[in-house]
Image (cartoon, grey):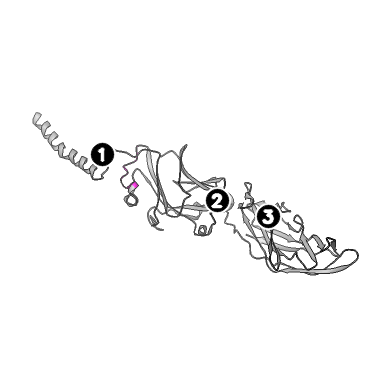
Amino acid sequence: MPRNHNRILRSLVPLIALALSGTACGYIPIGEKTESYEIYHDNDAEPWCAEGESGYVLKQDSILQGPHFSVGIQCRYTGETLPHEVAERASTIALLPRAEKGSEFIANHLTTDPESDFLDIAGWEVRSWVQIGDREFDLDAPPQRGDWIVVTAPTDVPAVLWVEDDGRAQGLDLRTGERIEPVFSYYTNLAAYSDLFSGFSYEEVHIDNGDEWSWLSCQYDGGNAWRSPWTEELGWAPEGSVYLGVFTYWCRDYDEFTWNLDQQRSITLASGEADAPIAWYEREVEGYGIEVQAFFLIPDIDSEVTIEFEPVGEIVDGEGDQWQIREPLQAAEWVASF
């Protein structure tokens, strides 16, 4: 028996030496585990996978959107160890040992909606972080195309990527791609802009001041509407609502008169409950008149809205005297379909 025991000891010596020397060369120490609640984050412009390949999970309904960002998961890998093709992507994750018992790796390579390349993000604070259970890990910058995030989490603990844009946060489940607390109106498949309107034409509108009479005219072939849950001027719309913006031109300035539109009565909604604008903006256009933008609050599920334009308002001459329109004007009706 003693001789057999010695033989076993001698046979173990080279194995131990090999394990030690392997560690010195960058191999994973035997028995070491990657603990839960670890996070690794960097950028790799080269996609980790392509459509049809293992790990490809990108779907339109798993892209998260806001006014100044978009992010979606293109590739995902989960398991007790990282796949070789993932681990070799970066030195920070290349030698990570197996996740500790009851935990797993969740590796995601991110992308963005191509249309988000045109978002104006300058000056807007977009905060992002990863939440594993009740622990939060701040990211240095909002998610960009090519970013990857690798976390270790207990298999029964949620792992969520959160993005907060102008005070409103939305989440993306790193295991499933499911949206968490989304801004619903971004994902209804309704268009953001309507087709162009037919405009309006008011020719020889007769006016008088009780003693004299004159006439004015204004025509514009165009205008449109758009819907958005957020605007720079108004911020976020209340939950369940979106802003409806209506755009048109108005002549306003004449040689002898100024024709101001009534901001509560000249552009109204003929459908739904919100008949008067909640906000009104004007911008002078040299040589023409003004651009007008009127904003309404409407339900975020409305796909069609009827708008009426009637240039009621105040007409004053160069002396400041008011003039009246002799006959009621016919309202122009526009239908905005999304």
> Of circles 2 and 3, which is in front?
2
In the image, is 150 to the left or to the right of 61? left
Decide: is 260 above or below 42: below
Q: Tell which residue pokes out farthest to the bottom in this image.
A: 204
Q: Label 1 vs label 3: CA separation?
A: 65 Å
Dominant secondary structure (helix, strand or loop) of the stretch shown in magenta: loop
Mark 2 Cα-neighbour bin, 10 Å: few <14, some 14–19, many ≥20:
few
Q: Label 2 vs label 1: CA separation?
A: 48 Å
Part of the protein shown in magenta: 92-100
Q: Which residue is mark 1?
A: 30
Residue 113 spot, x, y in % from top left: 49, 57
Residue 295 is tagged as 3
Mark 1 Cα-neighbour bin, 10 Å: few <14, some 14–19, many ≥20:
few
Q: Quadrant of residue 285?
A: bottom right
In the rendered view of the protein, which quadrant contains the C terminus?
bottom right
Residue 124 is tagged as 2
Residue 178 spot, x, y in % from top left: 49, 47
Q: How many marks?
A: 3
Q: Label 2 is placed on what type of residue?
A: Trp
In the image, is 216 to the left or to the right of 159? right
Secondary structure at numbered mark 2: loop
Q: Residue at 30% of width from left, 45% of height from top? A: 95
